[in-house]
Image (tube, rainbow, N blue to C red):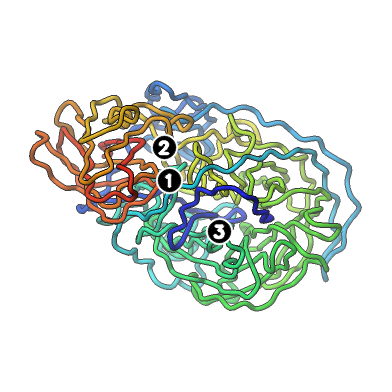
Amino acid sequence: MNLILKPRRLVFVLLAGASVALGCGGSTASVAGRDASSATAGAAGANSAGATGTGGNAATGGSSPAPTSGTSQSTGGAAMGGATATGGVAQDAGPAGGNFGGTSGTAGATETGGSLVAGSTISTGGSSATAGTIVQGGSTTTTGGKTATGGSIAPGGTITTGGKTATGGKTATGGATVAGGSKTPGGSTAAGGTSAGSTGTGGAATTGWVTIHNDFFWYDDTGAAIETRAGCLRKFGDTYYWYGLFAWQDPKAWNDQTCYASTDLVHWTNKGIALHVVAGANRMDVLYNDTTKKYVMFLKYGGDAASLGFATSSTPEGPYTLLNETQVDGANIGDMSLYEDDDGKAYLAYVWDQTGPNRQHGIYRMSADYLSLDTQMYLWNEASREAPHIFKRNGTYYYGVSETNGVNPSPTRYYTATNLTGPWSAATMLSTPGSSTTYETQVDFVLPFAGTQGTVYMFDGDRWLPTGGSQGGYVWLPYQFATALMPTMPYYQDWDLNVTAGTWRTFDSSRNLALGKTATASSEDSTNVAANVTKATTYQNYTATRWESAASDPQWIMVDLGAATEIDRAILKWYTDYGKAFKIQVSTDATAWTDVYSTTIGATYSVTDVTFSKTTARYVRMYGTQRGTTNGYSLFAFMVLDDP
């Protein structure tokens, strides 16, 4: 990403801390949703529902529930790498259950290959790089939307990060990994029950499922927006660490790289500034080196015409000490990321400026201690590409890039090879049905989640300039591999991931017990009525169906489930006019109410995903006591679930 700031109104709500760029360059095992909150009881429910979707052959799956009105059924491929867990999708399979806001896949267009370029210069001890393929392709940009109002989100206890990582612990980047993606003793962390009253970045369940909510902003456990632009997500020991750029809109703030920690990928604790530098830096990545027992941070150091910077620390969260910076074979670099192969060797994917800014890009093997360059593996003589990243699936390497569009969104392309030295295929456009700009994002990386039943390959993209219809700073989506080498990536506003199993499933709207049920409120305006929050919507039209209360306190909105029903989870999707202090309450008679969740720091364009002890209720309501703006309370959706 070359930062080209243009006059526009940004919708980012950067409270003291902001969001995302997970696991750069093909790191392994990580997940998060958005704004998950859990109730006082803290018992997490599992997302049940789910039989295997069409095309996804699973060992134990049943038939898929019929999609609700306004949704489509996704088609998946044969399950690989083991049987599918209840409602889950095994390796590369299609989604289980009905598609909530998804679209069907279409084939991606293959780009025209070009002529090979003569071998390039090499570093000491390296062999000549073979030629690269020239790819053709235009760029597509979108304009920014209006500015969302500020705010913060639900309060809650901080998360124990587990302290220092055991010596030798690290996450393999890309290739095959042990279950959960962690090499350290203790294995991976199951996504279990959420802690009382806290706000995180997704909904967790006791069976290991985590719900990811796209189109909304991310917040830490204090209610501050998470700031991790152009960074990475890694797992060291039993803890996930999310690193990135602080306050990306202000180039003066590019001196600080932040770090957040989570043991469940739901609740995130701000660990502070991991590295402060005197020159601007971004596109950072972190690996653990088994030989030196150090955590190594790599940086695009010094602006757009950058050097490769190195910093180290004895702990994942830092602080890191900057060691040095270097050009790559005598030239500056652009965007970069790191990939660690199955054998522990690390590789730099980078944009190279030797013949001009963003004129070439390639792959370089790092030294054994990760602190210097070793051998150039491959070089593409192709201009206007950014965000290089690598992942591996079934012995095939995928090298991906975006276009050079500044902070505007871009399509994503992939080359494939069975060896990092090539030969590499011509680039093929990632199929993103209904979008020519990867759903208004720029790709950061793809994370493989290797589990006991398969592997999920998850796309992460920065939504630098969200618009009114597509909010949120980050997009996480599962790649779907059928029989083709190239994946497709339909869009889901909500989907479930099981890191331990290595499976995923669509968020089946039939699990929403409030769908189509009667909703009433203390007040509403003539257009944005209470009934809107229980309507079936997709990601394309969710912004058009919301409830807005009068501009006074207190206010409430209530869903009547029609009969006393067992429930243990509620999901509220907030508009810019949010509740700062509110409760979620349940009742059997709409008279006597029991609190199952309470907070005093709600946030704009957030998702409150609350899991609580199973209870029987007919009525569920949000009772607001303090608005976050001078307007009323406003919700897009009010969901109620019974997740076993």
- Looking at the rendered structure, the kind of residue marked 1 is Ala
Q: Are marks 2 and 1 in contact (CB under 8 Å)?
A: yes
Q: Earlier in the sequence, mark 2 or mark 3?
A: 2
Residue 19 is left or right of residue 289, and the answer is left
Dot 2, how many residues are within 10 Å of its Cα: few (below 14), some (14-19), or many (20+)?
Answer: many
Residue that label 1 marks = 501
Residue 317 x, y percent position in the rendering: 48, 70
- Looking at the rendered structure, the kind of residue marked 2 is Gly
Quick check: 276 above or below 209? below
Which tag is nearer the camera, tag 2 or tag 3? 3
- Looking at the rendered structure, the kind of residue marked 3 is Cys
Residue 524 x, y percent position in the rendering: 27, 33
SS assignment at label 3:
strand
SS assignment at label 2:
loop
Determine the CA span between mark 2 and mark 3: 26 Å
Residue 551 x, y percent position in the rendering: 28, 42
Residue at 26% across, 56% down: 600
Q: Which mark is residue 88?
A: 2
Residue 236 is left or right of residue 386, and the answer is left
Residue at 65% across, 50% down: 6
The residue lying toward the viewer, choosing from 196 and 533, is 533
Residue 384 x, y percent position in the rendering: 77, 48
Determine the CA span between mark 1 and mark 3: 23 Å
SS assignment at label 1:
loop
* Number of residue marks: 3
Quick check: 236 above or below 581? below
Residue at 86% across, 60% down: 128
Residue that label 3 marks = 232
